[in-house]
Image (cartoon, rainbow, N blue to C red):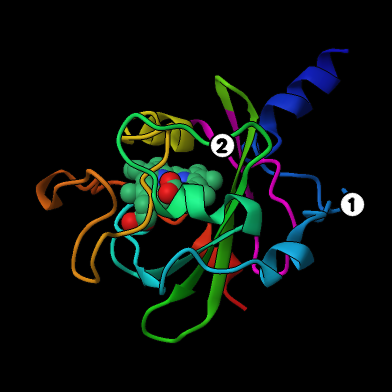
Amino acid sequence: MATALLMGACARQPPRAEAAPSQPVARWAELDVARAWPSASAAFPSRGHGVGQYLIDVRVEPRYLGAYRNLSRGQTLPVGTTLAAFHRDRDTGAAASIYVMQKRSDAEWEFSVADDEGRLRPQQSVELCSRCHAEAPADDLFGVPRSPAAPATGMPPGEAPAEAQLLDSGSVAK
Ligand code: HEC
């Protein structure tokens, strides 16, 4: 017992969030479908994810496309809506993480992160996602930019969040 404890204490402690290497990797089931969904706008430099390094292309299931495109302050999208944000490196064009929001109830969006091949990253903390999106103007959503140069809905340039990183983008690069 004492020996085990001692060994435990001496063992190098990996970060808690790290998944065991042998753990099977779940895939985001809707990825292939989502890739075929229409883009809500032309890809634009993301202001919320990864400090200007990524182009973001938000895909929306066709039946919710109009509602998302025309979203304005205070409006909501129906329960069941799924939005998939595909990212690309602005310099290299390399595909990066896919950020997903799925509306589970009137009060709850589920956030998830997959790599560019759709492998889910369950260990990824999504607390930051919901904290930042809670500040968004409409139903936790920022929406599409109203003009090519303009920020996403209701997001004055000075207020664009600066600290957001495209989480784990480094490890996703192939
Ligand atoms: C610091 C703020 C911030 C954080 C953290 C953040 N986002 Fe975003 N997100 C934004 C902004 C701003 C946009 C609008 C597009 C842009 O400029 O990036 C956006 C757009 C999106 C969209 C398109 C829907 C919309 O809001 O119009 C999805 C999907 C999304 N984010 C998912 C996520 C996920 C998943 C996470 C966590 C892994 C996350 N976001 C973390 C700020 C953030």
Left or right of 134? Residue 124 is right
Q: Is residue 171 something one can see in this rendering? A: yes
Task: Say which quadrant the C terminus sits in.
Answer: bottom right
SS of the residue at dot 1?
Answer: loop
In the rendered image, residue 35 lying in the magenta stretch gets the answer no
Front residue (pair 117, 43): 43
Residue at the extreme left of the image, as rendered: 158
Residue that appears at 58% across and 24% down: 108
Of callouts 2 and 1, which one flags the residue occurring earlier in the amino acid sequence? 1
Front residue (pair 171, 43): 43
C-alpha separation, residue under disc 2 versus residue under disc 1: 19 Å
Residue at the extreme top of the image, as rendered: 1
Residue that appears at 47% across and 49% down: 68
Q: Is residue 114 something one can see in this rendering? A: no
Query: Whole-percent x and y of residue 170?
Result: 51, 66
Query: Whole-percent x and y of residue 129?
Result: 47, 38
To which residue does mark 1 refer?
Answer: 24
Residue 19 falls in which quadrant of the image? top right
The amino acid pointed to by label 2 is Ser
| Secondary structure mostly taken by the magenta-highlighted segment of the chain | loop
> How many other residues sit within 10 Å of disc 2, few (<14), some (14-19) or many (≥20)?
few
The amino acid pointed to by label 1 is Pro
Q: Is residue 96 above or below residue 129?
A: below
In the rendered image, residue 119 lying in the magenta stretch gets the answer yes
Magenta-drawn segment: 109-127
Query: Whole-percent x and y of residue 32?
Result: 78, 67
Left or right of 27? Residue 49 is left
To which residue does mark 2 refer?
Answer: 125
